[in-house]
Image (cartoon, grey):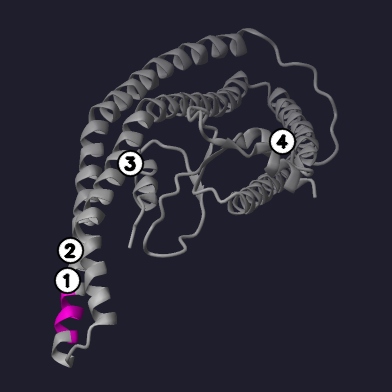
Amino acid sequence: MRRSVTGFCLLMLTALVLAPGCFKQPAQETKPSVVNSFGIIDLQKATEAHPKYPEVAGLQKQLNTLVFQINQRQSSMLRDTATLASVESSAAAGLQKTLEHEFQSRMAAKQEEINTRLEKSSLQFRRALIDEMKAFEEEVDRQIEPQLINIQLKMRTLQLTQEEKTALQQNFEKLQKERTDRLRLREQQLHAKLETWLAPQRRAADQELSAFAQQLQLELAQKEAAQKDQFAARALPPFTAADGSLPELQMRADRKQQEIAGLKEEILRDVRDKTAKVAISMQLDVVLANILVNSSAIDITGNVIAELKK
């Protein structure tokens, strides 16, 4: 007759807009249990321990060589035309792409920093809500379970008419529905309470990220201007011959990038699969990636790495 708050726990963990993804075990039944098992994994460490990860470094080295050859060939073509304007245009395009990549990388790192801080600040509050839900469920059971047990005893031990049995069964179902409705309503109330508590922190996080973006854009704009001045002031580096035409080199570089992306996705998919397998074997409800704020969580990074090496 008891019902746990595991479902509500999962709801609490996924309530953060900025929270990292997590691996979950499939639900076994509609009624949750009173288990609250957390796991954590260092996703970067697990990924780098994958047997195929050295292949990524090898492919990246090949790509870097192709990019260098492309740049050298482009420089040669620009020098042959003796047009400084073309040199500056090509350099500016490459510089813009580099700066855009830097902007995205630093923004992602800042967002992860904010996510971690927000997760840490909300963890204690969410645990308190889970405890509150558990206490409420126990109180509801203390009120309703004796009535349900009494009805069951009557139906099993007394000689009842069909009409009496029907009445008792209807009363039994009514009490069960009352219990379910009260618990569902309480879950909704606690979820609203969490959202209210999180709202100002989310706004502060958004404002912090926006301010950081503006500062970073100004910094990169100054960096771009300085490097353009350097491009205009210096001569092109000596050209080193490279095999293959420029379109062929570009096609090879594109294929190499696709190969790297595919291998990274394969590695990450394998890590996810092994994480799910370990989580199931260890009976964990939730596995968080790159979160180290839950002192009671189980670090399964080593277990996942062991699975990857089998």
In this picture, which residue range is highlighted in magenta? 165-171
Q: Are marks 2 and 3 in contact (CB under 8 Å)?
A: no
Mark 1 or 3, nearer chain start: 3
Give residue 37's position: percent from left, percent from top. Answer: 49, 44
Q: Considering the numbered disc 2 on the image, is that residue within a helix, a strand or a loop?
A: helix
Between circles 3 and 4, the one closer to the viewer is 3
Between circles 4 and 2, the one closer to the viewer is 2
Q: Which residue is mark 4?
A: 48
Q: In the rendered structure, which amino acid carries the disc numbered 3?
A: Ile
Q: Are marks 1 and 3 in contact (CB under 8 Å)?
A: no
Q: Residue at x 33, y 63 (%)?
A: 1
> What is the C-alpha distance between the residues marked 2 and 3?
21 Å
Between circles 1 and 4, the one closer to the viewer is 1
Give residue 83's position: percent from left, percent from top. Answer: 63, 22
> What is the C-alpha distance between the residues marked 3 and 4?
35 Å
Give residue 290's position: percent from left, percent from top. Answer: 55, 33
Mark 3 or 4, nearer chain start: 4
Q: Which residue is mark 3?
A: 130
Q: Which mark is residue 178?
A: 2
